[in-house]
Amino acid sequence: MKGTNFFCLVIIILISASFVTSSLLDDTPVSLSNSAFASARSDYTENATKITTGHSDSICQPKQIHLANGVEPWSSMIVSFSTSCQPEDASFSISYGFDPFYFDNSIHADPDEHMTRYNHTQMINEMHEYVFYQSDYIYHVPLEGLQDNRRYFYQINLETEGTGNRTDGLQNGDSLDSLFDETRIPDSYHRVMGVSKMNNLRRHMTDETSTIVHPSVTSTPFFHFTTAPIPGQSQNSDGDPIKIVVVGDLGQTYNSSMTMYHMLLEAEGHYVHGDDGVKASLVMCAGDMSYADSNQTRWDKWFDLISPLGSRLPFMVAPGNHEEECDVVTKESFVAYENRFAMPKVRNAERGVTGVKRHLTDPVNRQCMNRYDYGNSYYAFTYGTARIVMTNCFTNTTKGSFQYNFILDELQSVNRTVTPWLFVVTHCPIYNTFNAHQNETQTLQMQEALEPLFVKYRVNIVFAGHTHGYMISKNVRFGFLDEKAPVYVIVGEGGNREGHVKHYLNDEEAEEWVEIRDNKEFGFGTVELLNKTHVKWKWIRNEDVDVAFVSHEYYIENQVFL
């Protein structure tokens, strides 16, 4: 069967990588459309292992590389990675610049300032048996003072104490030719830059000895990202409209990897059937990333899997219920989420207990602290002509709460002349045509407190996940159509292991406020900021190895100008 052949192929690929002890992807059986689909999934997985392992089994090698926008995305980027090596045994730096053949900037990854680590204790059965986990050393290193709307190349450098441990660079006596082993360069790089660029790199680096003379310094392959345009600018560095990828409930199944693969094609401007070839430069994820559910090794596997995409596009995330993960000892929630990501926070995270109830089916999470404010919980940033507010529906949103006041301050202070577009990203959908996740406590509280703010301050689009389907609404307020009201989008079909939602609230006829809905297609969306009055929304469904189809296109008019 195709599924059996697929798993055999993936097992062979992953065992060949020294760091892999089990599959990167969930083994939940999902039917494949054809063998090409399986091939694409394994190709994406292989890219992940190339980035994170290179040709070394050194515990010091940087892995799980991913990006996030800084407080000012047009001038800063945060590079995150992890390592199993203790800070006293190795030091890291990041070199970066416009030219991959000559990096003119470098920053030291300071363990005291840039590193974090966390513990987690999980109860695994009703017999009160526990699993203790301690994370690797996780670095979040800010690159600041960048120029807006520019492509930067970067690589992570490792210096060890006299051992010469290598990641993906050279040791003393290695010839330069060995640096250009194509297996050391991710396939995604070849697709963007072309193999011929290697010849230029040879010319820039060749000297009389043709050797690297620093045996204890090694480097990853070089990656690249593009900084955001300045506030108010609607075009990217190619002169095209800004394109943002929006996804939810991603997971780590082979459907997830197809979504990631096609998102990577969007980043590279590759042809997607029915699309326009505009390059995406940002990912917004509406919660439920890894589906670790307190099994922390699944976070490690998810970041390994996401690296080909996450090392290229900044991943801006909002927490979902699968990120809650109550520690049975400390009673703290969202600990992995807070430590593994580095969003442009307002201030450090604060935890505690409130009297606000949430809809929780997990008995362990019901015992957990239910206050998680600031940090990565909720924040906001400007990207070109859009102000984007990321929220957390699983901490208090009632009127007068910390999060409510934060959202109120954000919405009423947006300059719609500079940033005419105002987006909100959350996990729980206020408008939901599906029969799953209806009337949940935290969603009802959010609807009561926040929908009046969304209407009053003319929020353009509210993105959500949680329900494993795709839906886009018409302009709606308090259940009634209104052309000046927000549009609500559910993007919960990223590829999660739980599958599609089975039914609609009304299987025969959609609600009046529904524009389109689907519960059969895995995929993601893109939003292009065309100008101050219109954005173009597309839903892109997974199809096979090289093809993703735009199954729905929709132009949204800015309610502020109506």
Image (cartoon, rainbow, N blue to C red):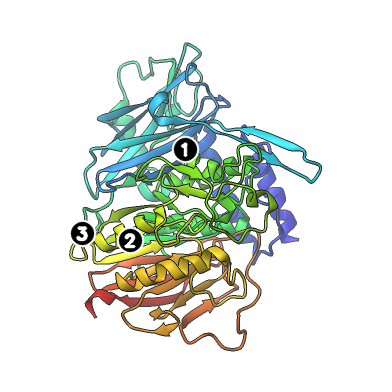
- Mark closest to the chain's N terminus, 3 or 1: 1
The CA span between labels 1 and 2 is: 51 Å
Type of the residue with mark 1: Glu
The residue most toward the front is 355
Q: On the rendered structure, is 88 left or right of 292?
A: left
Mark whose residue sits in front, 3 or 2? 2
Residue annotated with mark 2: 408
Tell which of 322 and 495 is nearer to you.
322
The relative height of residue 36 versus residue 333 in the rendered view (above or below) is below
Type of the residue with mark 2: Leu
The relative height of residue 137 versus residue 491 in the rendered view (above or below) is above
Q: State which quadrant residue 140 falls in.
A: top left
Quadrant holding the C terminus: bottom left
The residue most toward the top is 162
| Label 3 crowd (10 A; few <14 / some 14-19 / many >=20) | many
Instruction: Provide residue 378's location: percent of width, then percent of height.
Output: 41, 52
Instruction: Provide residue 209's location: percent of width, then percent of height.
Output: 34, 16
Q: Which mark is residue 233?
A: 3
The relative height of residue 108 versus residue 556 in the rendered view (above or below) is above
